[in-house]
């Protein structure tokens, strides 16, 4: 079979030949590319003496075709999937996992890597090369390459059990979510809910065989609006209790024992590999470095945010008392009264802002901002194949007019695209034998679609999302590393959100908004007082929200930074850890750990703090732009040189200091969030 994935791509810039690929091409192409990657590894092992070039560099350069084909496949599975692709994914994923393990468990290969590593100091390597050597060596060691015999078997067994328990945790949360439905008989019980939400509730009821009634579930699109808008306090309490006791009812879906198992397995694994705790293991490869640094980071924020959080609760209590004579504000009242208070204070809603954010203009604004800051330009190229007619491909050029990258933009929802917004890439960047191989980068979003009578008008939240993802894309497009595995967004986890989050800051700057935030009918610029309102509203209840994030981060660290055998009751443990951050009366029976999927199912264990960490970095870094001018050339150049182009070539602390001239400080975030006065 003539397989376009295995041929040389006859497209502009070697872009993926989407117009020729069909799903049936993937499996044979992946299998063939795996075989090719295995040959790359055999060649490395066949060299007489291991050197940095023939082992470490060669490993970074191995399996390139596999990377590109797998990239195309999984990107499509997220952005334009169908049953055929999904079923292929179930076949392809295990093949790739197995291939990855074959490499990391290859003792002969590891011995060669270790030999180079031991000579490290005598090799006269550049900082980037040292980083690559460390990262390569550690990827083996952290996967157990140094363990022998029984201990190696033990590690495999732990990994298997961990996978099973995390899966079970997630299945239980899903089962509890799917099982629950609350039926409302009378429309009068739905006061306060917007029409659209009522319609959705009526539809759910119909699907559940209760036509003519209304139904709510624990799915967020049903649960969150109900908690935010329902005047009916009993309804809010019912739903809150159902959500707050998820997987904590002592039945077959209870997750408390599973949590204990996961914690023990993670701890045993870390100890087996020579670490004090799971958090020590995870944080070795983070900017934050150690559990104690994370904990003191969170504690220091906690101290600053708490007075503001307390004042916000007082304000809300007074508001609810005056409005409805509420004697005690409960957890199920929080979202409802907050929404009303926010409306009263800022009278700002999405519909008021949308007319100023026409998608085409916002995209132009994003491009203009990038051009002003970094001198890069975007030209649409209809000759670059795309995977769906809604996708636009651009050629990106640098300030000298030289080709920099391909950029794909895919903005509207459709069946076959998953929810949310993300940046991804189809081809990484690297320098091989002096030749700079440029990347192909993409952002995928789910923005409000245009209708027959109206263009696509974005909410402000969608505008910041676009800037956010574009910031990630810049990190990819401006990459200038030698090695693909250290290039672009291949950085430590708690550093990867710096380029994306910092870019959001420009959405609040008049100088930037004036470029593109113009009324789609009248062309009038967005009024200054609206910009001010957006800023103020974005700080609404920041004290409380900050405390919430801190509480999750602290709980995560408490679970993972010590020997978990001391934890006998999940209920008591959670209560004790969350107490300093809980500003509303504790509701007996509820538990958050049992549905804390981020850390027990997903990959965020010992990483929840990263959200706040990245915010501190982006606010602190943006402060320099504010001092020097938000479009200051020298600052922008330094940001490109030290952050955007540098990727993971050195430790993020080193890169950050080079840009900022010092270690990051929390003050800029605290000021921006209104937690301390200027
Ligand atoms: Zn992001």
Image: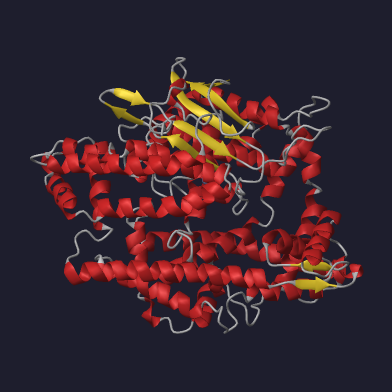
Above or below, 439 relative to 115: above
Q: Position of residue 161 (x, y in %)?
A: 38, 71
Position of residue 284 measured from the top left corner of the image (x, y, whole percent): 32, 56
Q: How many marks?
A: 0
Q: Residue at 75% across / 75% down in the picture?
A: 237
In this rendering, would 352 be left or right of 80?
Answer: right
Q: Residue at x 49, y 24 (%)?
A: 374
Task: Report x, y in % for residue 209.
Answer: 80, 69
Quarter holding residue 486: top left
> Which of the pair 13/385 is nearer the observer?
385
Across and down, in percent, residue 347 comes to 81, 48
Q: Residue at x 64, y 32 (%)?
A: 390
Tell me which residue sits at (23%, 41%) in the image.
39
Left or right side of 265 for 271: left
| Closer to the camera in the image, 460 or 205 | 205
Residue 131 visible in the shown view: no
Residue 347 vertical placement versus 231 (above, below) = above
Q: For the view shown, which residue lies furthest in the left direction?
A: 48
Say above or below: 77 vs 252. above
Of residue 439 and residue 620, the one placed in the foreground of this image is 439
The quarter of the picture where the N terminus appears is top left
Q: Residue furthest front?
A: 1
Which sits in the foreground, 321 or 266?
A: 266
Quadrant of the rendered image containing residue 507: top right
Q: Is residue 568 visible?
A: yes
């Amino acid at each position: 079979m003539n397989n376009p994935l295995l041929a040389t791509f006859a497209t502009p810039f070697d872009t993926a030949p989407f117009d020729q690929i069909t799903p049936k091409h993937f499996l044979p192409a992946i299998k063939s590319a795996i075989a090719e990657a295995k040959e790359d590894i055999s060649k490395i092992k066949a060299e007489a003496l291991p050197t940095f070039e023939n082992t470490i560099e060669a490993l970074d350069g191995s399996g390139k075709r596999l990377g590109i084909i797998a990239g195309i496949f999984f990107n499509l599975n997220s952005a334009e999937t169908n049953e055929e692709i999904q079923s292929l994914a179930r076949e392809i994923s295990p093949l790739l996992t197995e291939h990855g393990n074959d490499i990391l468990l290859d003792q002969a290969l590891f011995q060669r890597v270790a030999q180079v590593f031991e000579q490290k100091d005598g090799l006269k390597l550049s900082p980037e090369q040292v980083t690559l050597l460390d990262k390569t060596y550690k990827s083996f060691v952290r996967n157990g390459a140094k363990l022998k015999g029984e201990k190696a078997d033990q590690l495999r067994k732990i990994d298997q059990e961990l996978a099973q328990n995390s899966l079970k945790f997630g299945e239980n949360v899903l089962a509890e979510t799917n099982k629950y439905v609350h039926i409302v008989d009378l429309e009068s019980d739905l006061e306060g809910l917007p029409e659209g939400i009522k319609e959705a509730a009526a539809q759910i009821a119909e699907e559940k065989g209760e036509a003519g009634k209304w139904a709510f579930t624990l799915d967020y699109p049903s649960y969150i609006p109900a908690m935010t808008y329902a005047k009916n306090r009993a309804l809010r309490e019912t739903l809150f209790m159902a959500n707050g006791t998820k997987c904590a009812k002592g039945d077959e879906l209870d997750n408390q024992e599973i949590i204990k198992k996961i914690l023990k397995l993670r701890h045993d694994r870390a100890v087996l590999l020579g670490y004090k705790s799971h958090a020590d293991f995870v944080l070795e490869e983070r900017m934050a470095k150690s559990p104690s640094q994370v904990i003191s980071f969170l504690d220091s924020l906690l101290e600053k945010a708490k007075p503001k959080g307390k004042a916000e609760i007082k304000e809300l209590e007074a508001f609810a008392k005056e409005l409805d004579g509420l004697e005690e504000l409960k957890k199920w009242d929080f979202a409802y009264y907050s929404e009303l208070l926010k409306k009263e204070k800022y009278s700002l809603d999405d519909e008021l802002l949308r007319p100023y954010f026409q998608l085409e203009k916002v995209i132009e604004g994003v491009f203009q901002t990038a051009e002003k800051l970094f001198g890069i330009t975007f030209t649409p190229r209809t000759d670059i194949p795309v995977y769906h007619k809604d996708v636009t491909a651009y050629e990106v050029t640098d300030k000298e007019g030289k080709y920099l990258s391909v950029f794909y933009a895919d903005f509207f929802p459709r069946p076959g695209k998953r929810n949310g917004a993300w940046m991804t890439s189809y081809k990484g960047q690297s320098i091989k034998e002096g030749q700079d191989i440029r990347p192909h980068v993409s952002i995928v979003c789910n923005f409000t679609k245009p209708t027959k009578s109206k263009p696509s008008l974005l909410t402000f939240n969608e505008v910041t999302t676009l800037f956010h993802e574009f910031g990630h894309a810049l990190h990819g497009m401006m990459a200038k590393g030698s090695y693909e595995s250290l290039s672009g967004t291949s950085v430590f986890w708690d550093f990867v959100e710096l380029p994306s989050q910092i870019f959001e800051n420009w959405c609040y700057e008049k100088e930037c908004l004036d470029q593109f935030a113009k009324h789609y009918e009248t062309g009038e610029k967005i009024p200054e007082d609206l910009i001010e309102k957006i800023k103020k509203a974005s700080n609404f209840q920041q004290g409380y929200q900050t405390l919430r994030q801190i509480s999750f981060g602290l709980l995560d660290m408490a679970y993972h930074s010590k020997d978990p055998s001391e934890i006998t009751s999940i209920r008591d443990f959670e209560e004790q850890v969350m107490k300093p951050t809980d500003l509303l009366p504790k509701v007996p029976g509820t538990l958050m750990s049992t549905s804390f999927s981020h850390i027990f199912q997903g990959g965020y264990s010992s990483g929840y703090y990263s959200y706040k960490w990245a915010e501190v970095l982006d606010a602190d870094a943006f402060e320099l732009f504010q001092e020097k001018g938000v479009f200051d050339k020298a600052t922008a150049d330094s940001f490109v040189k030290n952050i955007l182009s540098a990727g993971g070539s050195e430790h993020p602390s080193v890169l950050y200091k080079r840009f900022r001239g010092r270690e990051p400080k929390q003050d800029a975030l605290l000021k921006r969030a209104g937690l301390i006065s200027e």
